[in-house]
Image: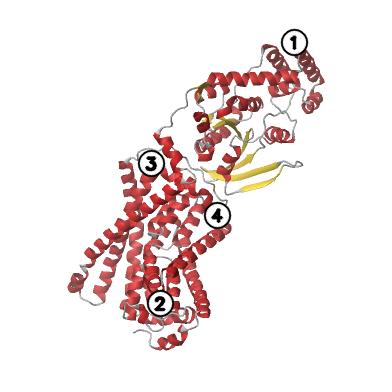
Amino acid sequence: MVERRLRIALAGNANVGKSVIFNYLTGLHQHIGNWPGKTVERAEGTLHFKGYTIDIIDLPGIYSISAYSIEEQVTREYIIHEQPDAVINVVDASILERNLYFTLQLMEMEAPMVLALNQMDVAKRKGIEIDVEKLEKILGVPVIPTIAIKGVGVFKLLEKAIEVAEKGGSTKAAIVPFGREVEERIIALTKMIEGLGCRYPPRYVAIRLLEGDEELEREVAKLSPNVVKAAKRFSREIEEIHGHVCSTVIAAERHEAAGRITREVQRIVPPIKPRLEERLHSFTTHRVAGYIIMIFLLLSIFYVVFMVGGYISDLLNSLFYSVEDLLYNFLGAGAFGMLTWSVVEGVIAGVTIALPYIAPFYIILYLLEDSGYLSRVAFLMDSIMHKMGLHGKAFIPLILGYGCNVPACLGCRIMETQRERLLAVFVTTLVPCAARTVIILGLVGKYLGVEWALALYALNLSVIFALGRIAFKALPGEPTALIMEIHDYRLPHLKTVLKQTWFRLLEFVKIAFPLIVFGSFTIKIIEVFGLLEPIALALSPITVLWLGLPAVTGIALIFGVLRKELTLIMLATLLGTTDFADVPGFGPIQMIVFAIVAMFYVPCISTIAALIKEIGWRKALLITVFEIAFAVAVGGIAYRLLAALWPTGHPLKELHPGIIGLLP
């Protein structure tokens, strides 16, 4: 599908929230320069939204389009000459009358237009109530209430601007008439201009000629000098009637029209007590309280999903593994029995991950989404996530990755574009999941102290940030800004949430289970045919010489691809002890290096299955290969740095003999 390109200009008075909307729409991708030949700053940004590539132009904040100042000239010239597909006129709802003066001038220019009635919360606090529908009817342009600093209404505003842009010039704003003496002369002059072939709207030209616009006088004089003479005559007549220069009369009548419209649509009421939903919104998006609530809720979710999930997973594991002996007794302990068990084990691995972790994750995710809280978390984290080249919504799967990378990868589908999804998925797989946490804490934390374990987490965060930035710069395509509708809080619809969860689980089972079973079967074949030791020996240049680890760790790392928690168990089996401090050649440096490699190389086969499902097998393979290579590279560098800083008990001296007798 070919994306359509649109240009939308933001216009309005200064300090009405125009720049807030601009940053909200284009936060990740802005260009700041100067307008050609002017010293006025020109801010442009691009975003992708619903199949459209939209260039947003933030016009200077001005109070009129009289072309007296450079900013006014820039705004007028852009709207008239560049003719954007739509103009979003941002007005401050709490001072509507003052802002409408500029709005009336924009309407005279007949630009396709949407009015953003911003700062509605401020207006409400002042007791100002605005009849939006009535205002829309009087002006003849769509009016969208917004609270830009909280992202409220911006989604709908953009949708409406696209709708207006698609209609082009087929919809025009209403004509707000001036006083009788002025209006009669505008109509007469408009009729004279029609048919001249002037590139501007006739009524706009008529008004500007009466106001004494010299630039337009010169342009119209080339087409018809009589029109300019008539305009000057009409202007003098108006001056004689009102006793003021014509431009002053027209400006005064615009102010009067703005006041009249405001009085019709606005009424002052006692300040309305905010509704519960509004108070909840303010509280959960507060710049301090909002983050505290978010951290508390996310930790609670983390606890519920992974503590409860872990309990159920252990329960299911003990239940399923209780049939292992029965199956071996029935099929025999030979190759056939082992291969059959590998298939069963693959199914067990899928069930004990999918049911305990993914099901509650999806239920909670959809409850948060349906209630409206998810969009507020994204809003809170947007500026922080920008540092990593992602926007706020990516925070959700990222934090869930600390529990399990599988639901975290699946959660990346909330990102809008393939580019953002790929970036989020890549970063998410680098997050140490609960199984990798077992290795970090069970090895480094237990034998070297928690400070070393925390140092590894700090290293992990640094790497995630650095690789995220590199991927952000390297990936082709335009970044997407956060455009997310923030609707009012509401009670989630439980039936819908459960249905969504069920469909997602079913989808996961169909795609991931065959891959998990296949992976389990393949590893078992390697084991049955006695290939583990040759593989460990083949890997020894990497494990022993580059990483400084005992050769048997290669086997443990291979089993870790099936399930990460098996890594430590397998290592204990191969080394013949659970007390790793007693293992020769497996000192503090090896523990740290082993944990680093386990922390960065692709989590497990379930995660690879989730990657294939989300981004396709080619990209999944690329990420898998990259992360294995990266983990080995970082592990080797860490080994040499630690060996230099920690010279006692140099591991290679102890490990070289180990190459001869690979297995205990």
Measured in 3D between alpha carbons, the distance from the residue under mark 3 to the one under mark 2, in whole angstroms, is 47 Å
Name the amino acid type tagged 1: Ile
Q: Which residue is mark 3?
A: 371
Cβ–Cβ below 8 Å for labels 3 and 1? Answer: no
Q: Secondary structure at mark 1?
A: helix
Name the amino acid type tagged 2: Gly
Quarter in which the C terminus is drawn = bottom left
Pick whichever of labels 2 and 1 is earlier in the sequence. 1
Q: Nearer the viewer, residue 35 or 239?
A: 239
Measured in 3D between alpha carbons, the distance from the residue under mark 4 to the one under mark 3, in whole angstroms, is 28 Å
Image depth: mark 2 or mark 1 in front? 1
Q: Secondary structure at mark 3?
A: helix
Measured in 3D between alpha carbons, the distance from the residue under mark 4 to the one under mark 1, in whole angstroms, is 62 Å
Say the numbered circle drawn on residue 554.
2
Query: Residue extending furthest top?
Result: 241
Say the numbered circle drawn on residue 387.
4
Going 26% across and 64% down the picture, which residue do you hit? 317
Name the amino acid type tagged 3: Ser
484, above or below 198, in the image: below
Pick whichever of labels 4 and 1 is earlier in the sequence. 1
Q: Secondary structure at mark 4?
A: loop
Horizontal side of 317 relative to 30 (left or right) equals left
Residue 250 location, quadrant: top right
